[in-house]
Image: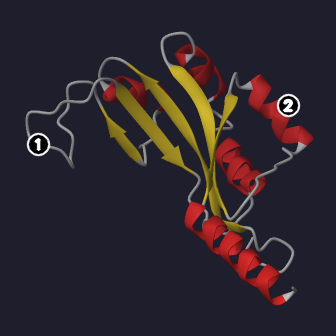
Amino acid sequence: MFSANHPEIYRQYAYLSITGYGPSDDITKILKTTPSDEWSEGDPWKDKPPNEKRFSTSWRLNSGLKETESLNAHIRVLLRNLRRKRLELLSLTGKYDVKVVCVSYNLQSFSFELDFELQRTLTDFGLRLWFDAYIDHQAHETIADLRQQLSQYQK
């Protein structure tokens, strides 16, 4: 998505997120899939002092695509990889928070239209979407500064 048509997008990706409580291995056993990242409640934080423990369990499966691919492409790959796991995913709903997280880093605004067939499949799998859209405030401030400088030359 780094093209002249979409210069406002730095990077984007989507992943399956399963959060809750208990051992993350329980999720791995049900899905029979190795997570991209996982931890269980009570596990030590990797980047914090040794006495800091995780408050909850997290299990994550990445699409494996580059962050230059569209969110629809990431979701399509995730669903393709999970196509035989529908009943297992549905069994996790209720005990865990199961969703597809879409992340986008942008210069200014963010908009996205999910492919309708992907919407149907997500619903069929009991998956909801969560969006994390981030705006690069530094770039936004730079643009505002440039606009102010330009206005001084137009006087």
- The spot of residue 49 in percent (x, y) is 11, 42
**Residue 120 numbered mark, or none:** 2
**Residue ID at (68%, 54%):** 74
Q: Nearer the viewer, residue 149 or 58?
A: 149
Vertical side of 97 occupied by 67: above or below: below
**Residue ID at (18%, 44%):** 48
Q: Give the Cα distance between marks 1 and 2.
A: 44 Å
Q: Are marks 1 and 2 in contact (CB under 8 Å)?
A: no
Q: Mark 2: which secondary structure?
A: helix
Name the residue at the top extreme: 94
Residue 4 in the figure: left or right of residue 74: right
Task: Tell me the quarter of the picture where residue 79 sits.
Answer: top right
Q: Nearer the viewer, mark 1 or mark 2?
A: 1
Residue 59 in the figure: left or right of residue 119: left
- The spot of residue 38 in percent (x, y) is 35, 39
- The spot of residue 13 in percent (x, y) is 62, 55
- Identity, as a three-letter code, of the amino acid under mark 1: Pro
Badge 1 is on which residue? 49
**Residue ID at (56%, 59%):** 64
Vertical side of 113 occupied by 66: above or below: below
- Identity, as a three-letter code, of the amino acid under mark 2: Arg
